[in-house]
Amino acid sequence: MELIVRNAKLRDKKYLVDIGIDKGKIIKINKTIQNKGLKEIDAKGNLVTPPFVESHVHLDSALSAGIPRYNESGTLIEGIEIWGERKKDLTKEDIKENAKETIKWLITNGVLKIRTHTDSTEPSLMTLEALLEIKEEMREYVDIQIVAFPQDGLFSINNMDKLMVESIRMGADVIGGIPQIELTREDGIKSIEYIFNLANKYNKLIDIHTDETGDDQSRFTEVIAKYTILNGMEGLVTASHATAMHNYQNDYASKLISILKRANINIVTNPTSNAILQNRLDGYPRKRGHTRVDQLINSGVNVSIGNDNIMDPFGPLGKGNMLQTAHILLHTAHLSGNQQILQLFDMISVNGAKTIHADDYGINVGEQADLIILDAKDEKEAIRLISECLYVIRKGKVISQTKPAERKLELGGKIFDIDFKLP
Ligand code: FE2
């Protein structure tokens, strides 16, 4: 065997296992594997899981914060203005350099599957071209799915509908949209109809920036559910953000969630961006601006997590760390119940895989050997400590290794090693 990972703690097993890998695939999972591997890693009882899934990120704008200027108001509107200014002298090389650097951060943090929304409003479609090239160049190391994203709306600028068709012809995997940005509600509905027609014609998945606002009158999530059911596309459609849901009247939210369950819609929540962008104009009291994560999950709706913005005009911080997003959402969405912490781990792994329709996901014999070893004994410790990802293994090869920090505390002449873990 090319590689054996020993003493691995899998999420669904009470005891530790050895994982045997050969020719890029998992070939054996046993309490003990007697054979010797060409290479061996001792996981030391740490949590070994499939890689994290980043189900919503904008790689084309990542790492561009401050260019040409910083977002001083912190609002979504100023962010859109700055991105518009940035696009004027953006080059393909700029996008590729920053996007690739961001992907390296994501991989080091244990992400091997990414869905990225790519601004498709430039007549040259340069951003899409840049991301398509990166997808090919990095195929060996990471799976990237590209959403053609009409950032400024489909019908608020001329010829955008033609650019969407061209984006699909160029190779976009998923059709995006942003109905609440259209000039009128009618145009918003028209844009959803248009997206479903395209998806049917070209056999594509759908992922729409939906009701990303604090406006409780923004009600496109229900329209997306309706067209999903009408088109028999249950499970194939994602509503990203859905933050207005936070502010809906409870009777309406309850009805909506039951429709979302029926349509098998995936919801992606973006804890960092939603926390700072939505309900910012409330004054006080200020609502949280996240979608209703606990109610959605309790109703059986698939919810996953994205970083959305990593150091760009919309979100100034971030380092592509899914555990950090889960940690933040635990606090901002009241998800601190013991079982809810496990659900948070699902949201950055298995739920994300469901959202992006990754059918090759899991640590099972016969699967591609993509897995990560965390510096944590279980899910709660991983989220609490925002643990380092000690090893990232892709197709049976170690592509990233991280050494956790060493801390020495001296008290009364004695040296203590501090790692913030329970003894
Ligand atoms: Fe987004």
Image: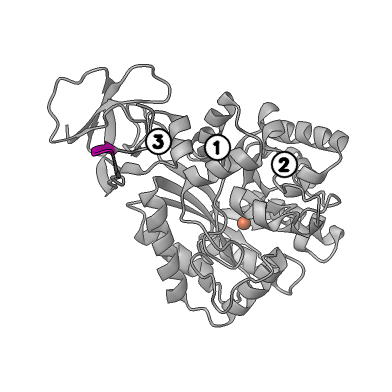
Task: Residue 73: name its quadrant.
Answer: bottom right
Q: Which residue is mark 2?
A: 228
Find numbered disc 3 in the image and state the secondary structure of the residue it sits on: loop
Find numbered disc 1 in the image and state the secondary structure of the residue it sits on: helix
**Which tag is nearer the camera, tag 3 or tag 2?**
3
The residue located at (63%, 69%) in the rendering is 163
Q: Which residues are magenta?
A: 412-416
Is the stretch drawn in magenta largely helix, strand or loop? strand
Q: Quadrant of the C terminus?
A: top left
Whichever of callouts 1 and 2 sits on the residue coming sooner in the sequence is: 2
- Numbered badge on residue 50: 3
Task: Residue 416: name its quadrant.
Answer: top left
Name the kind of residue labelled 1 in the image: Met
Structural distance between the alpha carbons of marks 3 and 1: 13 Å
Structural distance between the alpha carbons of marks 1 and 2: 22 Å
Q: Callout 3: few (<14), some (14-19), or many (20+) C-alpha neighbours within 10 Å?
A: many
Q: Position of residue 287 (x, y in %)?
A: 76, 48
Answer yes or no: disc 1 within 8 Å of ligand 1.
Answer: no
Looking at the image, which is closer to me, 127 or 333? 333
